Image (cartoon, rainbow, N blue to C red):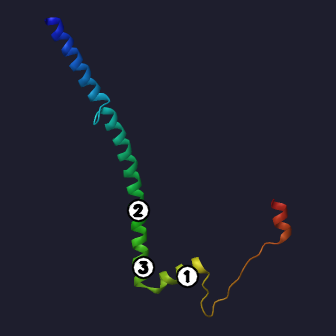
Amino acid sequence: MIRLLVALLIVVFAVLQYQFWAGRGGLIDFASLQTQLDSQSVLNKKLKERNRVLKAEVFDLKRGYEAIEERGRADFGLIMKGETFYQIVESQNKNAKQK
């Protein structure tokens, strides 16, 4: 009778150990979820910074023409009335020597 009880307790202990280590919600799942949480936190920080920059840019674009002008110059090559545009072109011989 005692041997049967000891064997039953060993089986119950083994099942509980399995549940603790490898079962659903066990230690292995916890470690996996912790890794996912850490990587998502890093991604969230990057996205928050990007959103902050975009929000500041939208604010600048709504408030004044300087930001619009700067964006036009950088993205579209805007040249204002009365300004002179200079384009520097490297010679063909210089490009061939560098390669």
Q: Which residue is under mark 3?
A: 60
How far apart marks 3 and 1 lie (CA) works out to 13 Å
- Residue 66 % position (x, y): 48, 84
Badge 2 amino acid: Glu
Q: Earlier in the sequence, mark 3 or mark 2?
A: 2
User: Which residue is drawn at the image coordinates 63% and 93% (left, top)?
Assistant: 82
Crowdedness of circle 3 by 10 Å Cα count: few (<14), some, many (20+)? some
Front residue (pair 81, 51): 51
| Position above or below: 87 against 51 | below
Label 2: how many residues lie within 10 Å, few (<14), some (14-19) or many (20+)?
Answer: few
As drawn, the label of residue 49 is 2
Q: Position of residue 94 (x, y in %)?
A: 83, 67
Q: Residue furthest bottom?
A: 82
- Counting from the top left corner in percent of width and height, residue 12 is at 21, 20
Q: Quadrant of residue 14?
A: top left
Q: Position of residue 29 (x, y in %)?
A: 33, 37
Q: Nearest the camera: 98 or 45?
A: 45
Instruction: Say what secondary structure mark 3 lies in.
Output: helix
Circle 1: residue type: Gly
Q: Residue at x 27, y 28 (%)?
A: 19
Residue labelled with disc 1: 72
